[in-house]
Every structure is written in C-alpha cells, then in structure tokens.
Image (cartoon, grey):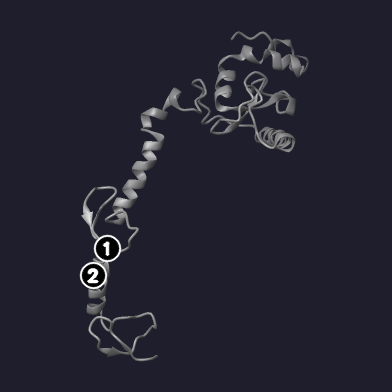
Amino acid sequence: MKIKKCIICNNEFIPKDSRIETCSYECKGKLYDKRRFRYKSKKCKNCGKEFNPYYSIQLFCSANCRIEFQKNKRSKRWGTTENIIGKKNPGYRNGFYMRGKKKNNRGEVIFTKNAKEIEQKMIDSKGYKYCEFCETTQTPRFERHHIIFRSEKPNHPNLHDKGNILIVCIGCHNILHKHKGLRNKIVEKRKLNEIFSNDVLDKRT
C-alpha cells in the first residue's frame, strides 16, 4: 500500500484501505465535522428543529424523525382506526362474522379456480377486469361473489360453478349481500333457479 498524506493534519501514513483519507480516528472526526458543516443549516421536515445536514438532500435531523414522518404520512392517508371500523370499512359485510367458521377446503379450491378463469377470460377479451354488476373499473379491489349464497345451499354440487360466480367491486358486493332481490334478473338469465330450485327467486330487497 502506498504512503498517503492525511487530508487533515498532512502527516504521512500507510492506510489499510485505499479509501481511507485520515491517519487517525481524531482526524476522521474532524473530517466528519468539516463535511457536516459545508451545507447550510435547514429545518427538519418532521420536528422543525434546525440542523446541519451531512448530505445536501438530507431532510431530517435524525433517523427517528424520518421514521416518525413516514408513520404520520401513512396515518393521514388511511385516517384513524375509528374511521375504518365496522360499517365504515369498505370490506364490511353487513355484520357477518366469518372467523372461526369451518370452510370446505375442496369447495374453496374449486371456487378459486373457477373465479380465476372468469377473471382471466375478462382480461383476454377486454384487456382489464371490471364489475359484472355495474361494469365499473374504479374500485380498490375486485371481489368474488356467490350469486346463490353458500348459506342458502351449502352442500349443493353446483354451488361453486362458474355460472354462480360474479366478479364485482366492493360497493356492489356489499349491496348484493344486503339486497338479495337485486340478483333476480341474473338468476333468471343464468337459469340458476332451474339448478338450485325456484325458492332462490323473488327474495325481498
């Protein structure tokens, strides 16, 4: 390794690494201070405290301020916890509580497979997914809906068929769960009353 001159005290030294510029920790600290104060002081974006940035693009006085700022930014985007509890949550399902209920794993596999095929057919034909009930494309996510509910015909062999599945937006999913009568036209069009029996028609809204 070549002999170098310390950029702080000009003493000659043999560095262990070619990137080392100072001869001692004391000189290294002075170099740090020198570089730290080469930029004008600015206010921390989070706490407003004045600080001397080490880099020109530095916005926060410390790592804690940067993390706190990011947390606050997320909370402003989503709002407080009270704003997404219960009926205010876009995924609310009319008071239904599904946790703890046993699901038919085989039925879930068939349902998921058929729903994915419907979604892929949408993309192949139109190039995008859309709500089959209102035809919107503007929704945080698309959901899969049983036209004839699982609770109505839990053990029916055609429950998870493609004809009984709708790809819908969150808003329509909530409405269809709340007002069964809105599905009557779809039931008749797909002849689901012939498959599941006529008692699935004429539900009160």
Which mark sits nearer the N-terminus, 1 or 2?
2
Dot 2: element: helix
Quarter of the rendering containing residue 14: bottom left
Viewer-closest of 65 and 95: 65
Q: Amino acid at mark 1?
A: Tyr
**Vertical arrangement, residue 132 with respect to residue 68, above or below:** above
Is 96 on the left or on the right of 22, as rendered? right
Left or right: 4 as drawn, with respect to 162: left
In this rendering, is residue 91 above or below 59? above
The span from disc 1 to disc 2 (Cα, nearest Å) is 11 Å
Residue 143, image x and y in percent?
Answer: 60, 30
Q: Residue at x 77, y 17 (%)?
A: 191
Query: Which residue has dot 1 on it?
Result: 39
According to the image, label 2 marks what residue?
Answer: 33
At a point 72% along the width and 36% down the height, the residue shown is: 117
Amino acid carrying label 2: it is: Asp
Mark 1, other Cα within 10 Å: few <14 / some 14–19 / many ≥20: few
Number of numbered callouts drawn: 2
- Give the x, y percent position of residue 6: 28, 84
Q: Can you tell which of label 1 and label 2 is closer to the viewer?
A: 1
Q: Nearer the viewer, residue 148 or 25?
A: 25
Label for residue 48? none
Q: Position of residue 4 (x, y in %)?
A: 33, 88
**Residue 76, horizontal then vertical, whole percent:** 36, 37
Query: Do labels 1 and 2 touch, CB within 8 Å?
Result: no
Which part of the image, by quadrant, shows the N terminus? bottom left
* SS category of the residue bearing label 1: loop
